[in-house]
């Protein structure tokens, strides 16, 4: 196997994605490629991240800040960091195969093709069914990024290069539990960031009220600017019978201090219960105060996302449009009966 007999552990492994329409370009023409054809030939750009960022911004002046960092970084890695002899893992969509190859050329600009003009030649070494790999390895190659480095399951792909058939995957895939946890954690992180980005201050209070409504509470939002520590009043039932729940909602990124929780306690009347909702978490003192005052429930970002997901289908349409999600099923590892 040409060039693949070197020390495999020292080789970098890249994962790359492309739309299904490019499967033929990648597999039949032994080429990997990325887009952004408006940038032109990148071989003349100074080989550092700042130069690629400047080139991207000058070409796409209306690009969002987040896209600038991700896309210019992808272009820099593909053009400058990727080296001849590195390995490539490409999950093809048309045949649901995992294709493993070796980078066989430096960066090439091919202005004769549409869109995917930034190219490299690759020598494909293996084309294996997805079922030959653990769920964890498949999840890592399912990254949302166009180009990324494979790290956690690199050894599994290196083993696949060396062997004729990958047949040593355990009957019970131990990576399933890890994969499920990673998916849940990544989803939670994404939702917290999106809520924090799109809903600040009073908008976050309105959102919390809607989540409570989806849970079956009746809510009243306090007049903005003079709530005295009460953002929302929640009741169970149309008659607004006790117990009344006084709710404080904070969208700040920093941890909630005990003084803020004390403000909520001060706004509560005898017989009230309290909810304090934050996208972040609570300081040590605040957690101790909550433990000493069980009539107040502190809900942190992770706990709030869990409620958000549980009652997602009952939220107002505007919030479902703001945070579009699709329900999927993920495999979990069976608990041992021993």
Image (tube, rainbow, N blue to C red):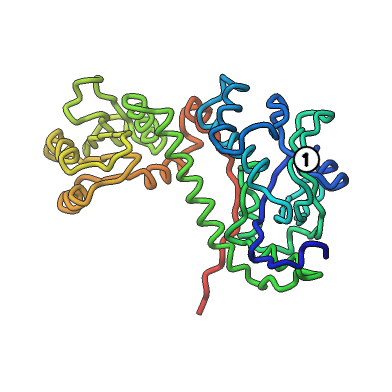
239 vs 47, left or right, is: left
State the image quarter where residue 296 is shown. Answer: top left
Depth check: 256 or 308 in front? 256
49 vs 310, left or right, is: right
How packed is label 1: few (under 14 Cα within 10 Å), some, or many (20 or more)? few
- Which residue shows up at 77% across the image and 33% down it? 117
Relative image position of residue 9 (x, y in whole percent): 64, 66
Q: Residue furthest right?
A: 28
- Which residue shows up at 77% across the image and 70% down it? 163
Of helix, strand and loop, which one carries label 1?
A: helix
Relative image position of residue 298 (x, y in whole percent): 27, 45
Pick the quarter of the image with the N terminus.
Answer: bottom right
334 vs 283, left or right, is: right
- Which residue shows up at 62% across the image and 55% down it? 150
- Which residue in the structure is indicated by mark 1? 20
Relative image position of residue 12 (x, y in whole percent): 65, 57
Depth check: 303 or 23 in front? 23
């Amino acid at each position: 196997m040409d060039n693949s007999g070197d020390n495999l552990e020292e080789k970098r492994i890249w994962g790359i994605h492309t739309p299904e329409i490019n499967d033929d370009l990648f597999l039949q023409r032994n080429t990997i490629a990325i887009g952004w054809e408006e940038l032109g030939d990148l071989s003349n750009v100074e080989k550092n991240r700042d130069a690629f960022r400047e080139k991207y911004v000058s070409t796409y002046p209306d690009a969002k800040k987040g896209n600038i960092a991700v896309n210019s970084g992808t272009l820099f890695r593909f053009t400058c960091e990727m080296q001849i002899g590195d390995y490539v893992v490409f999950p093809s969509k048309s045949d649901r195969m995992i294709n493993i190859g070796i980078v066989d050329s430096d960066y090439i600009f091919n202005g004769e093709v549409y869109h995917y003009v930034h190219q490299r030649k690759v020598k494909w070494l293996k084309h294996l069914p997805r079922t030959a790999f653990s769920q964890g390895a498949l999840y890592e190659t399912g990254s949302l990024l166009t180009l990324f480095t494979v790290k956690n399951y690199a050894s599994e792909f290196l083993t696949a290069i060396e062997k004729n058939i990958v047949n040593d995957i355990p009957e019970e895939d131990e990576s399933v539990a890890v994969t499920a946890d990673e998916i849940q954690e990544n989803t939670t992180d994404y939702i917290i960031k999106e809520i924090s980005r799109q809903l600040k201050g009073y908008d976050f209070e309105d959102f919390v009220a809607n989540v409570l409504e989806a849970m079956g509470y009746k809510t009243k939002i306090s007049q903005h600017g003079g709530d005295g520590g009460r953002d929302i009043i929640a009741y169970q039932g149309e008659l607004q019978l006790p117990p009344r729940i006084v709710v404080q909602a904070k969208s700040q990124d920093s941890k909630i201090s005990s003084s803020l929780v004390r403000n909520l306690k001060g706004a509560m009347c005898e017989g009230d219960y309290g909810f304090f909702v934050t996208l972040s978490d609570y300081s040590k003192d605040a957690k101790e105060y909550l433990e000493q005052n069980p009539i107040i429930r502190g809900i942190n970002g992770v706990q709030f996302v869990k409620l958000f997901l549980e009652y997602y289908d009952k939220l107002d349409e505007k919030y479902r449009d703001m945070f579009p999600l699709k329900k999927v099923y993920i495999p979990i590892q069976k608990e041992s009966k021993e």
